[in-house]
């Protein structure tokens, strides 16, 4: 299932992409039971499926504490060589 297969909210202007520039589009494959549940919830709440998925992810994935977010950012910025050196240092300690 591609999320964009669902009908859009009728208040949106046809042909205009309502996605803010700071958002990234993804394609998801859902099992049939979740797809049906998503379609039913979207229909009964008159909300686009994308909004329901975003709300569910926000509830399931709370924000990281700042110190942990900074640590992840440092790991992401580290070079492969730095990570390999860190791994070697850990092995040397044991």
Image (tube, rainbow, N blue to C red):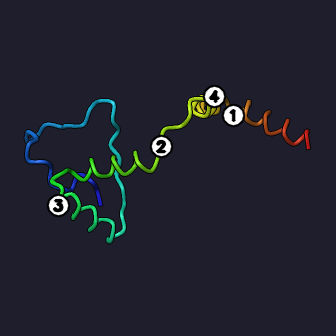
Q: Going 74% across and 30% down the picture, which residue do you hit?
A: 82
Q: Quadrant of residue 69?
A: top right
Q: Which mark is residue 80?
A: 1
Q: Earlier in the sequence, mark 4 or mark 2?
A: 2
Q: Give the foreground label among 2 and 1.
A: 2
Q: Going 20% across and 50% down the picture, which residue do you hit?
A: 48
Q: CA distance from mark 3 to mark 2?
A: 26 Å
Q: Going 10% across and 41% down the picture, which residue do you hit?
A: 12
Instruction: From the viewer's perspective, tell me whether residue 56 is left or right of residue 9.
Output: right
Whole-percent x, y for residue 5 in the image? 21, 56
Q: How many neighbours does mark 4 have within 10 angstroms: few (below 14), some (14-19), or many (20 or more)? A: few
Q: CA distance from mark 1 to mark 3?
A: 49 Å
Determine which residue is flagged by label 4.
Answer: 74
Q: Quadrant of residue 80?
A: top right
Q: Is residue 48 above or below residue 88?
A: below
Q: Is residue 47 above or below residue 40?
A: above
Q: Give the foreground label among 4 and 1.
A: 4
Determine which residue is flagged by label 3.
Answer: 44
Q: Nearer the viewer, residue 87 or 63?
A: 63
Q: CA distance from mark 3 to mark 4?
A: 43 Å
Whole-percent x, y for residue 62 in the image? 47, 43
Would you say the residues marked 2 and 1 are in contact, meaning their CB atoms lie under 8 Å apart?
no
Instruction: From the viewer's perspective, tell me whether residue 48 is left or right of residue 10.
Output: right
Determine which residue is flagged by label 2.
Answer: 62
Q: Secondary structure at mark 2?
A: loop
Q: Quadrant of the N terminus?
A: bottom left
Q: Earlier in the sequence, mark 1 or mark 3?
A: 3
């Amino acid at each position: 299932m591609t999320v964009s297969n669902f009908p859009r909210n009728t208040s949106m202007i046809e042909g205009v992409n309502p996605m803010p520039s700071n958002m990234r589009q993804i394609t998801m494959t859902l099992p049939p039971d979740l797809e049906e549940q998503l379609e039913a919830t979207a229909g009964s709440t008159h909300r686009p499926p994308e909004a329901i998925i975003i709300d569910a992810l926000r509830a399931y994935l709370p924000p990281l504490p700042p110190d942990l977010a900074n640590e992840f950012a440092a790991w992401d910025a580290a070079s492969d060589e730095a990570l390999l050196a860190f791994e070697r240092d850990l092995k040397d300690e044991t």
